[in-house]
Amino acid sequence: MIIVDENGDQFAPIWYIDTATGKYCFLLTKNGQDFALTICQGGAYVPSGATITESNQPPLFFLHGDRIVVAYWADVDSDGATTQSSPVADRSIINVLSVNTNQSAPAVWTFVGRYTTPSMTKLNYLGGAIDPNTGRIVIAGYGTDIGLPTIGPPTTRLEMVTIDPPYDQYNQGFSPKCNVLLPDASLFSDYLYPHLVIDSMSHVHVMFEIENGQTCIPGPCPPFSQPTTYKSVVKLTVVDTTPTPPFDLCTLSTLPGDTVIHTPPDGQAFPLYGLPCVHRSSRFPCDLFYDESDDGVYWIVRAQDVTDTSSPCRMDWNNQYTQAFSLYKNGQQIVADLSAVFTQFANPLDINMMTMTKLTDGRFVITANSRTAATDGNPNHINIVTTTDFATFSPNWFYSTQFGVGQRLRVSKPNKNGSWPSPKLHLFHGGDECNPTMIGNSCLPGPGQNTPHQFVFYRFTL
């Protein structure tokens, strides 16, 4: 997440794990330099009498006036219950802090509020947006009820909460906003990191993914010979939520052509939720963008479909597939496959993610990146094109990164998190895709090790 203020200053977070304490922490930068004091999510502002059990989700940042507001998640044990002497979470919290952008470094964060879920419920995998009209922050996430049966009425939901300015009253200003219960709860598992935008009428648009929760029976294909939870994902949208209480008009929608309809030889098909074992038969939300000038809500969706199901091993089905990055505006497809305009990629299947924004001169900017380009020896790590009408596109501009792109790019987005419109492309990426040939011994022993990382901040004049 990257923010540009009215002065053109760029703010971006670095989120990392402190290897000494095991806690997840964030550091806010300003124009590429350390700006605000580091906050460790697993240790700062813990509710009295509670224990943090998890805090490994990235924080959300918003700009309102001359303040940057951060909201970050943690699960907490507030009743002392334990399993094998370990704390057991019984609720979630969202801490809210703010910092004045006019401070000198190192700027000091101020604690302004906390949202606490009801007992025996959780809310995580968060996404958020700020209403440019009112300053209201809307946060959406994966809501769960703890300890309830998984069969029967749905116990998981896409859940939204709000906090209103001035954000400075403890436990005030928060309110439940909208719960969307999905059908056939037993068929899915998680909602992950929803994308949010808020339009000029203060309606909230959300794009999210759910994972196929069906057990995968892979067939004769060691080492996947036992049932597993190898999942596909499908993209859904929540559209046109009402901006005022009682928030009772939340509607669930899928974009045209977004459902996975494929019947393998054994007849086991799940038209809405994809197929167990077949992660290449899925729809993945890449980006959501709102353009105030034309009241357009834009979606980029990565669509993958397997093309060969002849193998008795379902896992092999993932080896041959097609891929397209479709662009929609207000629910209508306007570009069938954006991959075609990124001509620097020799194989469109090399593209992993796309994102988009708009400059003050009216040009839309779309970026495409390959997470594994550095290890594959492909020089086209990041490609950029511009367009004003989505019919003609500029030539590709591309560059390589020393450490690889990381998981994805972040660009500043007007009307998303309070960022101001800019004549320049503000871009942030970080990461090392474990590439020892370029940076020495980066693949350290142990699970999850992928260091060192490099965080890179750009301002591009296109």
Image: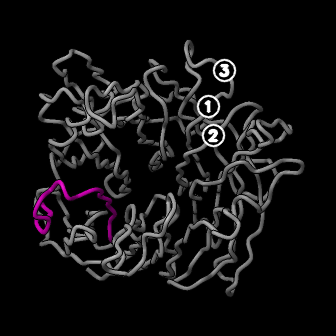
Image height of 134 relative to 456, above or below:
above
- Type of amino acid at the residue the image marks with label 1: Thr
**Image point (68%, 70%), residue name:** 20
Extreme residue toward the top, this view: 152
Along the line of sight, the residue nearer the viewer: 308 or 78 = 308
Residue flagged by tag 2: what amino acid is it? Answer: Leu
Element marked by disc 3: loop
Which residue occupies 34% across, 72% down? 435
* 398, 373: nearer the viewer: 373
Residue furthest front as drawn: 222
> Which percent across, then down, holds residue 454?
45, 78
Q: On residue 123, which mark appears?
A: 2
Quarter holding the C terminus? bottom left
Location of mark 1 (residue): 144
Magenta residue check for 158 = no
How far apart marks 2 and 3 lie (CA) works out to 15 Å
Lower position in the chain sequence, tag 2 or tag 3 = 2
- Residue 268 vs 416, above or below: the answer is above
Along the polypeptide, which appears first: circle 1 or circle 2?
A: 2
Query: Residue 388: image x %, image y %?
Result: 20, 64
| Front tag of 2 and 3 | 3
Magenta stretch, residue numbers? 341-359
Q: Nearer the viewer, mark 1 or mark 3?
A: 3
